[in-house]
Image (cartoon, coloured by chain):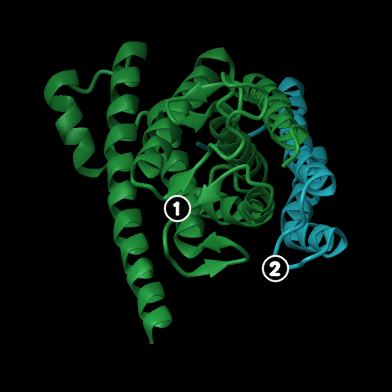
Amino acid sequence: MNFYTPLIAEFGTVLLAIGVAYAGLRVYGREKIVFFLAGSILWTSIIENLGVQQGSYTYYAYEGLLGSWYRGYFLWVGNVPLWVELGWIVVALSLFMIFHEVLLPGRNAFLQAFCAGLFAVNMDALIDPVAVANNLWQWLNPSIYIIGVPIYNWVGWFLLVFFYDLTFNYTVLSNRSIFILGKIENLLLKNRWSRWERVARFTFRIVVTNFVVAVILTIISSGLAAAALALVTG
Amino acid sequence: MARESLSEEQKKGVRVGIYVNLLVLLVFLVVLATGHPIAFFQTTAASVAYSVVVYLPVMILCVIAYKRLRQR
């Protein structure tokens, strides 16, 4: 292993994230982009740390390379490198802008989110195989793999971008209820949409939809692990 | 959210977003070129070819978005 591969990935992605944050600032203004960035960090922190906790993958391949203090990368959120979460932001925000502002402006929100999710999977079809080949992260679960990446990862990318796209759109860009979540929110928030009520709604929706996505992915990954085991044992 | 038109400032922001989307390919090509090839493809050249081909739909999307942005 060389020491510059993780550095290129980490600093390269940080620069891209600065670029996309600047872009988002120009398009949506400071308040909305802070919502997107902070929400994304919360969104990815929960699901990514859960994944590490469950033993699905690890980010520690380069631990100790630059010294005993070095965990593999410089900045972390729990057991997840910050650059990984910033990379998610790069994908999600750039696609959000492309579909919401240029290619599908004013169209059905589910269509916008669906297209963003689809192209997020496409982008990850580049990112993940290269990252795995270079030990930027390592997949640990038995599963059905395509080019070194478990299938449920592709499903996960789609679901995460799809649901975050909808959640941000409905909560921050337009004041819209999301099914039963709106009813639960209004028990406390009484249909108010000031900044702090929006923060509360956004946080609540992120936590709930994150939980839903985590459950779906756990079911899929367990099924695929069982299928992989069945294939191996014949 | 329906958006009738984008201001010049917003268009500039979207353009930067499109450039960033394309630069993702560059960053990961550099990682590939300086590190290890994808095991399935065995060589760096084949891995680079795969990376470019798999990213083609995204590149086409960016080109279409860029052209559509210029028309607005």
Q: Residue at x 45, y 53 (%)?
A: A156
Rendered hue of chain B is: cyan
The disc at residue A156 is 1
Q: Is residue B15 left or right of residue A181?
A: right
Amino acid type assigned to the residue bearing label 2 in the image: Phe
Where is residue A118? Give x, y as percent.
56, 57
- Pinpoint residue A227: horizontal percent, then vertical percent: 37, 75
Residue lying at the far bottom in this picture: please name it: A234
Q: Tell me the kind of residue under disc 1.
A: Gly
According to the colouring, which chain is green? A
Q: Secondary structure at mark 2?
A: loop
- Residue nearer the viewer, A66 or A191: A66
Q: Is residue B28 above or below residue A183?
A: below
In the rendered image, is residue B30 in sight? yes
Same chain for the residues at labels 2 and 1, yes or no? no
Residue A58: x and y in percent read: 49, 43
Which quadrant of the rendered structure holds the C terminus of chain B? top right
Q: What's the chain of the residue with tag 1?
A: A
Which residue is at 58% across, 55% downward? A121
B50 relative to A164 in the view: left or right: right
In the displayed image of the protein, which residue is found farthest to the right? B45
Q: Secondary structure at mark 1?
A: helix
B10 or A48, which lies in front?
Answer: A48
Please indicate, yes or no, whether residue A173 appears anywhere in the rendered image: no
Identified at 19% across, 28% down, the residue is A185
For label 2, the residue is: B40
Position in image of residue A68 (x %, y %): 58, 21
Mark 2 → mark 1, Cα distance in angstroms:
22 Å
Residue ID at (33%, 71%): A226
Which of labels 2 and 1 is toward the front?
Answer: 2
- Residue nearer the viewer, A98 or B3: A98
- Quadrant in the rendering for residue A168: top left
